[in-house]
Image (cartoon, helix red, strand yellow):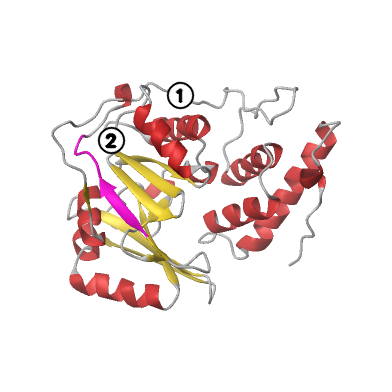
Amino acid sequence: MTGDSQFTPKPLSASEYALALFEPSDNVAVLLRNRRTGQTVQRITTAETVASPEFQSSLRRENSAGADIFIGMNPIKDGAYSRTKSNIREIRHLYLDLDTNGHEAVESIRNSPEVPAPNFILDTSPDKHQVVWRVEGLDQKQAESMLRTMDDQFGGDPAATDSTRVLRLPGFANKKYDEEFVVQVLHESNQVYHSRDFMVQEDSPDTSRHLGDKSGRRLSQGHKSQSEQDWAYAKRALARGDDPALVIQRIADFRADDKQDPEYYAQHTVAKAQAQIENNNDHVQPEIAERIDVKR
């Protein structure tokens, strides 16, 4: 692991973090998701505006009212009003969302010779973390391939492997759980990395993605749509024993801003994945075989 030996790690406020991620004039996406009301609001503005006292004050009000606060990891093109792949101006960051065995995963990353020292590590809830690297010179295909590979290697959330992903903004309470947790970030390096700094073998559509059985099935080369990726993720997660309800929640959270009924979509996707696993495995774990009732 390459590091920045001259840098002293330090915590950052939300404003400091936004300006550490982006140039002041960069257009960035800020997403507010209120689980109480079911409302999701996205605003695209400059990093300088996001860091301003007025904008931060409005985010604090929304957070107090129940909204979770997220920020996009890559800048948006000028004149764009949505956070789609075609509107991503350039790849500025790689990241992992570590929601299982988070402390162990972070230590594994810090001690790994295959990835450089992270620039930022966020504590998003007890034993859950998000890890961010600043990069340059990568296109979207390269970045998403590396994200999938690092996700497989370090046990991250497969839903967080696309270039449009939003991660949590520090300084605001995580409203996902009954007991609130204020998200914190530690700035650990000022380095800007390149593809050569990541020694992990890049993923590709031809790379085998096993479902935990003995068949060694592959995803088809035409596997490109987000819905197909969601389905593939559901199959992998269920096959390794993840709670179906948790898989549903992850997919629903990920698709909340582009599906009219993300909960139904996620339930349908997981039920479809369960059926596929049952059809292709002689011995399926009971918790995986249990069907989920899909209700509109």
Among numbered discs 1 and 2, the one appearing first in the sequence? 2
Task: Residue under label 1, please give it.
Answer: 202
Please state if 251 lies on the left or on the right of 75 as rendered. Answer: right
Whole-number angstrom distance, CA of label 1 to CA of label 2: 16 Å
Looking at numbered disc 1 in the image, what kind of residue is underneath it?
Answer: Glu
Question: Could you say which disc has been placed on residue 135 in the image?
Answer: 2
Name the foreground residue: 105 vs 159: 105
Left or right of 183? Residue 275 is right
Residue for point 29% across, 32% down: 117
Question: Label 2 sits on what residue type?
Answer: Val
Give the total of numbered labels.
2
x and y percentages locating residue 289 in the rendered image: 81, 44
Magenta-span inclusion, residue 190? yes
Task: State the residue in front, 277 or 140.
Answer: 277
Asked if residue 238 can be seen in this view, the reply is yes
| Residue 66 position in % (x across, y down) | 45, 74
Q: Which residues are magenta?
A: 183-191
Residue at point 64% right, 41% down? 237
Q: Where is residue 232? Give x, y as percent.
A: 64, 39
For mark 1, give the secondary structure: loop
Image coords of residue 186 (percent x, y):
27, 48
Callouts 1 and 2 close, C-beta under 8 Å: no
Location of the C terminus (image quadrant):
bottom right
